[in-house]
Amino acid sequence: MKNKSGQQIKLGVLVTVGVGLLILAIYFIGSRQHMFSQTFEVSAVFKDVSGLQVGNNVRFSGITVGTVNKIQIISDTSVRVSLVIESRTQQFIKKDAIAVISSDGLMGNKVMTINPGSTGGAEIENGDEIATIQPVTIDDIMVKLKETADNAALITKDLAIVMNNVSSGKGTIGKLFMDSSLADNLDEMLAGAIDAVSGLDENLEAVQSSFLFRGFFRRKEREKQRELERQKKLEQEQ
């Protein structure tokens, strides 16, 4: 009799623990799916959902506020994603809000992120469709990296050809650097320019010493001196 009572007690404990675990599981699953809170539903249309799945989180300002409820292909270039969001966040999401698919960490699950929209805009309503931005995928990044690498390789190849031509004396730049006669001509042109400037200075001195222009230069000198004295007087008055 005692053994039978002990077995019944154990069975009752096991049943109680099992029911408790079942209730906890239902609670956690319901909380994750927002079954115990008021919600509203909106949708967003993408060309590519980039691996987004039903049940993935919806985040607003970094906070999980809902889940992806349904993903439906509506054409060969469009996929509609239905979102279930907690009603307490509805007042903060505007009609011009934007939805974008992002990753939860570097290699984590996909999440739907909602940007709130303009301040003071109209509040989003149940059944509205949110504007979207197509996410950048890893494939897009790899294609861009490959294009950059190919362009860098072409530039390096062209630069090597140019430098080889320069070192071989080919082309205008190559001749300029490698042809000694061009360097000698440049030296002669520079020397001629220096002589011309020197001659100009000598001619200017000769003009200044000439009695025909002596009065002109003296008058200019006196005007310059008077201007300096006037400026000095104005500074002293200030």
Image: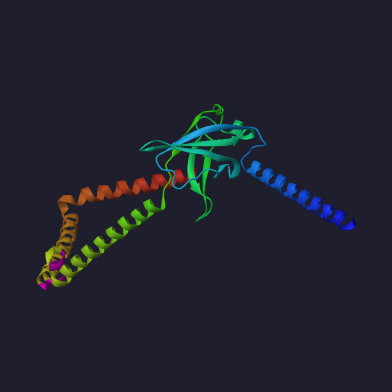
The residue at the point 48 percent across, 44 percent down is: 101
The residue lying toward the viewer, choosing from 80 and 182, is 80
The residue at the point 34 percent across, 49 percent down is: 225
Up-down: is 125 above or below 64?
Answer: above
How far from the left and from the top, in percent, is residue 2? 90, 57
Q: Quadrant of residue 183?
A: bottom left
Residue 161 lies in the magenta stretch: no
The residue at the point 32 percent across, 57 percent down is: 146
Colour scheme: rainbow
- Give the side of residue 2 with respect to residue 113, left or right: right
The residue lying toward the viewer, choosing from 59 and 157, is 59
Up-down: is 10 above or below 83?
Answer: below
Q: Quadrant of residue 174?
A: bottom left
The residue lying toward the viewer, choosing from 191 and 152, is 152
How far from the left and from the top, in percent, is residue 137? 41, 50
- Give the side of residue 78 with respect to residue 28, left or right: left
SS majority, magenta? helix
Residue 177 lies in the magenta stretch: yes
Up-down: is 4 above or below 83?
Answer: below
The residue furthest right is: 2
How far from the left and from the top, in percent, is residue 3? 87, 58
- Give the side of residue 16 with respect to residue 89, left or right: right
Query: Is residue 195 at all visible to an observer of this figure?
Result: no
The residue lying toward the viewer, choosing from 187 and 224, is 187
Q: Quadrant of the N terminus?
A: bottom right
The residue furthest front is: 1
Q: How many marks?
A: 0
Part of the protein shown in magenta: 173-180
Query: Is residue 85 at all visible to an observer of this figure?
Result: yes
- Give the side of residue 130 with respect to residue 226, left or right: right
How far from the left and from the top, in percent, is residue 71? 48, 39
Up-down: is 183 above or below 12?
Answer: below
